[in-house]
Image: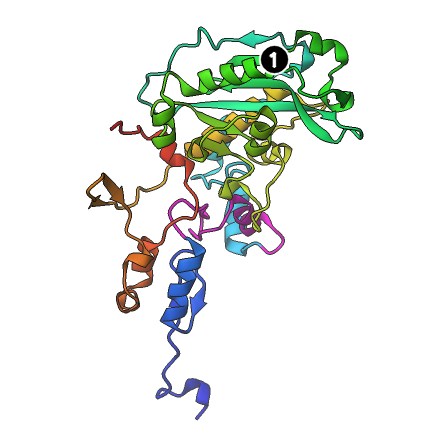
Amino acid sequence: MDSDHDPLKTPSLRHKCSACYKQYKKKEHLIEHMRVSYHSVHQPRCGVCLKHCKSFESLREHLMGPLSKSNCSKIFSEQGCGLCLRVLDGPESLSDHQDICCITAPVHQGTSLPPTDLSDCYEEDRSDRGLGAIAIDCVMAGGGSDGALDICVWICLVDEDEKLIFNTFVQPQIPITNYRHEVTGLKEEHMRYAMPLKNVQEKVLKLLLNGESIGRLRLNGGKAKLLVGHDLEHDLDCLRLNYPDHMLRDTARYHPLMKTNLVSHSLKYLTRAYLGYDIRQDGHDPYENCVSVMRLYKRMRSLDHHRQVMTLSITPSCIQYVAPNLDSHSAKDLEKMTPDELYEMSRSNFKCWCHDSRRVMQT
C-alpha cells in the first residue's frame, strides 16, 4: 500500500493565523507570531481574501504586484479602486466610487500667495465631531557656508476645510546663503515682508491651542488641534516649536502609509498613490502640500474599523478603559485559545487615525 495514502497515518496539524494565513506546526510558534505581528482590525486588509497586511504598500503588492495572488488580482482588476484599494460590488459602483476617490489637485499658489493671518479672528472650534486638525508645511532656504543648513523662511497652515488660516515668510535666524530659488521660488526681496520667528511661534501655538490650556494639551489634548504634516519633526525643529507627540499626525511616520520595511514614502508618492494627482510640478508650494497632507489624513481617519472590546480598569488615581491583550493571559491560557481568539487579543503597534473621528470624552 502506498504510504501517502496510509489510512493509519495521522496528518500533521497546522496552526493557521486568522489574519495573514501563515501556518505553523506548533501552537507556541503561532502565539509568538501573534505577539510580534501586531495584527488587528486596523491593519490594511484585502477586500477579496480578507488577508491582513502590514501597510497599504504590502496590500498593493498583494493585489497588483508581480507576485500577486491570482484570484485576488483578477477580482481587484475588475472591481478594485487603485487609490484606496477597496473592492466594490461591481464595475458600476466602482465607477461611481472612483469619481469621488480621485481628487482634483489644489490650485498652485506659489510665492504670489498673499500673507494671511487669521490667528486673532479664527473662531474656536467647539464642535463635537471629534479632534479637529490643522495642517502645516514649511519651506526651507539654505544657511551656513555651503548652504546645506535648513532655515525655515516660509510657513503655511490650513484647516480641515482646506481654508488658508496662516501664511507668512519668516525672518531667518542666521544669514541665508542659498535661497534654493529653483525649488522655493524665493528671492531676497521676499524677506522684506517676513515676520519675526517669535511672532510666528506665538501665532501658530494660538491656532493650535484653540483656547485650551497647556496643561490640558499635555494631558489629553482637550479641545486643542491635532497637527498634521509630513516629517513634522523636521518642521517643528526648524521652527523651534514643541508640540506633544500624541497630538501629531505625521504622514511620513504613519505605519499604514510607510513602505513594508517601515521606511517613509515621499509626500509626492503618497499623493499620487492615494489621492490620484501630482504635486511639486514646478517647485515647493506649501499650500499645495498642506492641502495634500490634510486630505491624506482625512482619508485615513475616515476608514471604518470595528471597535475593539474594552474592559474597565480602576486605579486609585483614575478610571480608564483598557483593551485586553496577549500579555494579559498566561501561556497556558493562550495554548487553549483558537486562532480566532488569539487574533481578538492581538493589538496594533500604532494608534489608528480612525480613533480621531470619534468624539473625545472630556473629563
Estimate the x, y position of residue 349 in percent, counting from the top left.
Answer: 43, 48
Q: Which residue is mark 1?
A: 196
Position above or below: 285 against 115: below
Question: Compared to 32, does 196 lie above or below?
Answer: above
Q: Which residues are magenta?
A: 39-67
Counting from the top left corner in percent of width and height, residue 11 is at 38, 80
In the image shown, does 320 or 7 lie closer to the viewer?
A: 320
Residue 24: quadrant of the picture: bottom left
| Residue at the extreme bottom | 1
Magenta span has 340?
no
Residue 122's place in the image compared with 335, above or below, is above
The x, y position of residue 89, in whole percent, is 42, 39
Which image quadrant is residue 317 in? top left
The N terminus lies in quadrant: bottom left
Question: Is residue 190 left or right of 162 when viewed as pictured?
Answer: right
Judged from this view, the residue extending furthest toward the right is 146
Tell me what residue is drawn at x 48 percent, y 51 percent.
53
Q: Judge whether residue 3 can be spotted in this image.
A: yes
What kind of element bears circle 1?
A: loop
Q: Nearer the viewer, residue 77 or 114?
A: 114
What amino acid type should be assigned to the residue bearing mark 1? Pro
Q: Is residue 10 left or right of residue 140?
A: left
Front residue (pair 358, 176): 176
Rendering colour mode: rainbow
Splitting the image into 4 quarters, where does residue 178 fall? top right
Q: Residue at x 39, y 78 (%)?
A: 12
**Residue sitting at 41 percent across and 41 percent down?**
351
Instruction: Say whether residue 108 is left or right of residue 262.
Output: right
Q: On the rendered structure, is 363 left or right of 348?
A: left
Question: Quadrant of the image for the C terminus?
Answer: top left
Can residue 99 be seen from the camera position used here?
A: no
Q: Say if the magenta span includes residue 63.
A: yes
